């Protein structure tokens, strides 16, 4: 009886070693990085400290598509390290950026639309494929002349099929260079 009990305990122990870690493994949730929610990283991105903003960019880049609006804002940061890291994060996200850019291009705020259009032009066709029809629509019908001009430029650039063809000075927000 005690031998049978010992082997049952041993079997339960082995089962726990195999099953529990697989079932209890902490999975990264979509809008979280290092256990902190997207909103935490967005708030950190507003810090006066460029190192904190850079840290936020790194985390936002790992979160993915939901972080695109914050990364687009950081793309125009006054610190070139933060600005560069934000654009690299967007580029590394690849095609997942397209739907979010398309959504941002429909925003009520012309500045948001302008940033999204410029990002689409910079990222190229492969990353912004889903945004291409929206860029065409904005080039013709946007209420802001600046957005229309940027959309026409992005249309020409998107025909480059995936090349990041905008010059860095063309992607900067007005008055930041």
Image (cartoon, rainbow, N blue to C red):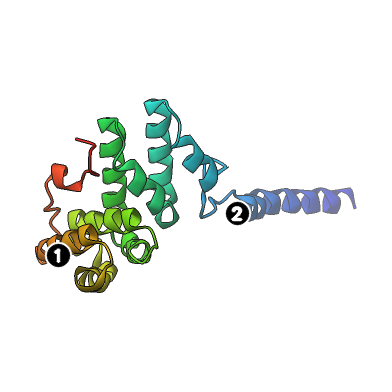
**Residue at point 10%, 64% (across, down):** 156
Farthest right residue in view:
1
Residue under the point 41% across and 25% down: 49
Question: Which residue is at 45% across, 31% downward?
Answer: 47
Vertical placement of 66 versus 6: above or below? below
Badge 1, how many Cα within 10 Å: few under 14, some, many 20+?
Answer: many
Image check: 71 left or right of 165?
right
| 107 or 161, nearer to the observer | 107
Q: CA distance from mark 2 to mark 1?
A: 51 Å
Taking depth in this image into account, of 10 and 154 the one nearest to the observer is: 154
Horizontal arrangement in the rendering, residue 61 relative to residue 165 (left or right): right
Residue corresponding to mark 2: 22
- Residue 80 in the image: state x and y as whole percent: 25, 32
**Residue 143 picture location, percent across and down:** 28, 66
Kind of element beneath mark 1: helix
Q: Are marks 2 and 1 in contact (CB under 8 Å)?
A: no
Q: Which residue is mark 1?
A: 152
């Amino acid at each position: 009886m005690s031998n049978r009990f010992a082997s049952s305990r041993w079997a339960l122990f082995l089962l726990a070693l195999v099953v529990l870690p697989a079932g209890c493994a902490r999975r990264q949730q979509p809008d979280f990085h290092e256990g902190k929610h997207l909103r935490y990283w967005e708030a950190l991105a507003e810090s006066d400290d460029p190192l904190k903003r850079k840290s936020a960019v790194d985390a936002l880049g790992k979160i993915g598509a939901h972080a695109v609006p914050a990364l687009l804002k950081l793309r125009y940061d006054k610190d070139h390290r933060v600005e560069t890291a934000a654009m690299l994060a967007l580029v590394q996200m690849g095609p997942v950026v397209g739907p979010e850019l398309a959504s941002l291009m429909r925003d009520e705020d012309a500045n948001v639309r302008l940033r999204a259009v410029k990002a689409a032009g910079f990222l190229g066709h492969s990353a912004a494929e889903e945004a291409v029809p929206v860029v065409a629509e904005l080039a013709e019908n946007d209420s802001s002349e600046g957005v229309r001009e940027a959309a026409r430029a992005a249309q020409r650039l998107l025909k480059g099929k995936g090349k990041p063809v905008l010059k860095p000075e063309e992607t900067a927000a007005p008055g930041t260079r």
